Image: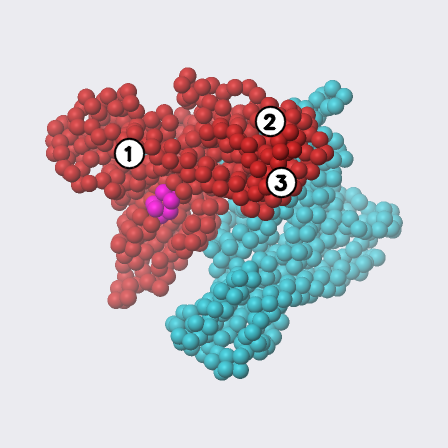
Chain colours: A cyan, B red
Amino acid sequence: MAKEITARSEDYSKWYNDLILKAGLADYSAVKGCMVIKPYGFAIWELMRDQLDKMFKETGHLNAYFPLFVPKRLFEAEEKNAEGFAKECAVVTHYRLKTDPDKPGKLMVDPEAKLEEELIVRPTSEAIIWNTYRDWIHSYRDLPLLINQWANVVRWEMRTRLFLRTAEFLWQEGHTAHATATEAIEETVKMLNVYSDFVEGWMALPVVKGVKTPGERFAGADDTYTIEALMQDGKALQSGTSHFLGQNFAKAFEVKFLNKENTQEYVWATSWGVSTRLMGALIMAHSDDEGLVLPPKLAPHQVVLVPVPFVNDELLNVMKDLEAELKQEGIRVKADSDETKRPGFKFAEYEMLGVPVRIAIGMRDLEKGMLEVARRDTKEKNLVPREGIASYVKALLEEIQSNLFTRAKSFQQNNITIVNNWDEFKDVIENKGGFAYAHYDGTQETEDKIKELTQATARCIPLDGEKESGVCILTGKPSAQRVLFAKAY
Amino acid sequence: MAKEITARSEDYSKWYNDLILKAGLADYSAVKGCMVIKPYGFAIWELMRDQLDKMFKETGHLNAYFPLFVPKRLFEAEEKNAEGFAKECAVVTHYRLKTDPDKPGKLMVDPEAKLEEELIVRPTSEAIIWNTYRDWIHSYRDLPLLINQWANVVRWEMRTRLFLRTAEFLWQEGHTAHATATEAIEETVKMLNVYSDFVEGWMALPVVKGVKTPGERFAGADDTYTIEALMQDGKALQSGTSHFLGQNFAKAFEVKFLNKENTQEYVWATSWGVSTRLMGALIMAHSDDEGLVLPPKLAPHQVVLVPVPFVNDELLNVMKDLEAELKQEGIRVKADSDETKRPGFKFAEYEMLGVPVRIAIGMRDLEKGMLEVARRDTKEKNLVPREGIASYVKALLEEIQSNLFTRAKSFQQNNITIVNNWDEFKDVIENKGGFAYAHYDGTQETEDKIKELTQATARCIPLDGEKESGVCILTGKPSAQRVLFAKAY
């Protein structure tokens, strides 16, 4: 723990990896591209998951669970979707191992246990779910059907990064069915707003809400809505997507309903998801060269209590009282009575772990009725009266939560640059970083060319953007509106 | 919903399936042997999972997440474990699909994307976890390591039954590492007790705690502890197991630690798990021919409010007040204001769903300041004063919880039969059902023979059983203690 991590200015990417390993958030595994989420990382994920789950339930969604495997013939039914994921599918072909006759004690795949039809490990569950919905939906009375599942999915990736891009990841996927296109689009936007409320309100990370250009759409969707966040290195990170699927899956799986006018119609669909990728966004959002900086709402320990300069019975008693007082206020508190480690070591450790508030309990301060309170975000230290400490800390946690958001918001605002020609565009993408807000002619060809020349991709057409017309920065052709471009994770 | 389900007396197995489908707990899927857990079933599972998770955390365990896949060379490292699961493994051999040149629009496995080493979809995670623990454990200071994960696992089964035996199922698996055998055995027993506290205290289902005979042990364990419950048809259901793994996995994966005496030692291990199989136990434990009967602690809706004989504004207002009052008491309540369904239909529906308490709100009763309260377990109905209804209902829910346990406990007690010879044994197994508590000579041969002759298996050696010696019911050879036998799920 005491060891340092690479500075951001030196190597941002290495800083990110060092931080994850040193703070015990995740670890590499023996399976190519798959990670182990360690207890501290998982505790953060649990806080994120529980809050999202609450928000999904408050908006009327129910959880369910569908199979891990998708039979090939179902997988290929919605062709665009299948095509989009075919190149990254893990495929189960056999269902048994047997003793290897040539290698004692070793096993081999039993060639006689070959499946008649291969099973795809789900990269996403539209196919298996819509195949099921056919049995569940018969009439308009069965609609809307509002279902979510928390699950693991697998997308075979060649270049992986802890949390940001792993072959297996954890996520939630909402899959809803509606009687009308309007209702389905409303749902798509509603869930985009749930995501942005969560990312901004809990992760303290501002996002731009927008619509993807056709080339960046989810395979099988009519429209993809996205929230895009900005990392400290000026790269964008797609943090959640919500898809209006039209009737594509209903048609592929023959899911019809009897409407109020007594005629059969195809059902309208949405799907929406966020994943453990959000952990990557959270880690990068606020952290510094000393380690993790966590927003209080997602910190497994919001406050840590450390006796200084050493542990004794009197300090232990004060610590126990303090712990109870803070817990009483609903604060997640850790009391560290470990006598084998010095305060300085512990301070560095809790900085690495991103604990928002540290309270040092010392005899001399106590004699004056005071405690030393340090906040992780600004590294300020203050002597604070012991009396009323719980309400002080409660307010401080709120202040830290809001300070992190304000800081990140001002960074985001300073890094959305309006550009009007190719030179300005290139300069922003190559030097300043962040989003370049530019006109382009709306063609796939131009998007591809921009990517080729600068590595920047169209992140989204912001929902609150004005419909101001202009000319394409690359081709000079007319453009109906500006689009946000950036290099992205 | 209004349709009936098969009576238990007619066909117990069909009753079980009908109930699951009619109550909307689960559904068959397009993937052989895999099920869909429907929203109502999943809501029950969430209540179970959340309570178990709380109990694991209270006993010092942390959650983490390990990869879905196990590379073959790791899978085969602990030979007994590998041998035990080899015949039921789903194997990933390829990582890509491609367009089938012979069938337009169809996909095929890309033969060029064959994995160098096959990946096993985890049937259990000892191998991948102990391979990771090697990097996490160095000294006695790293011990004990107390970790749990909630995950899906796959065991390829030929004969499957909803919840009881499915190719994919959801479970939790605890994997702990200790410095001494004593400590590991203590942990094994502690978690067995957590399981029995949960199954008895929350599912209202009495269990026998015991140790498995060697033939019934988990593959790779030195000892397997189990809780065995009894279903209404007299069959036993293994409801949770806790394994003392000795140093088997530490040796297979070279996991050593430096002890206080500064020497390297192999680590001692445990693992323990319960799964969605518990849903099967819960469904069968208390239900009847009208549908599900749920213990209040695990009922998604503990109380349902139904206006009778029809919905009007005044009743809706009373219902809204009642709903708020009950929620205030921490009761999970559903208010049914649906005007399109008659009360009789709703009553049958909520009986099918196993809602513990139903309150009918009618004008005539209200004029007398009364409400009609019906309990699902005994089907009693009572007129109860509107005043103080919340505390009445709270007490009633506790009474139902305890009544269900008492009923099941008396059933269990009446179905543990001490038998002293082969005729008695056969009579119990074939006619009475339940557990036959018998002496046997302790050999695998005799266990196999008993199974062959009667289908009964050794369920466990009860922990609280006396060490009374006797003679084997089959061979007449000496026996050190009695063992519980039963037909089992």
Residue where numbered disc 1 is placed: B459
Q: Position of residue B94 (x, y in %)?
A: 49, 37
N-term mark: 3 or 2: 3
Q: Residue at x 35, y 59 (%)?
A: B143
Categorize mark 2 by other alpha carbons within 10 Å: few (<14), some (14-19), many (20+): some
Categorize mark 1 by other alpha carbons within 10 Å: few (<14), some (14-19), many (20+): many
- The amino acid sitting under disc 3 is Leu
Q: Which residues are magenta?
A: B191-197
Q: Is residue A281 above or below residue B67?
A: below
- Label 2 SS: helix
Residue A160 shown left or right of residue B173 in the figure: right
Q: Chain of mark 1?
A: B
The residue nearer to you, when weighing B91 against A280, is A280
Q: Residue at x 46, y 77 (%)?
A: A308
- Label 3 SS: helix
The residue nearer to you, when weighing A8 against A361, is A361
Front: mark 1 or 2: 2
The residue nearer to you, when weighing B444 against A128, is B444
Residue A207 shown left or right of residue B443 in the figure: right
Q: Position of residue A157 (x, y in %)?
A: 55, 46
Q: Position of residue A433 (x, y in %)?
A: 71, 61
Residue A191 shown left or right of residue B122 in the figure: right
The residue nearer to you, when weighing A422 against A144, is A144
- The amino acid sitting under disc 2 is Lys
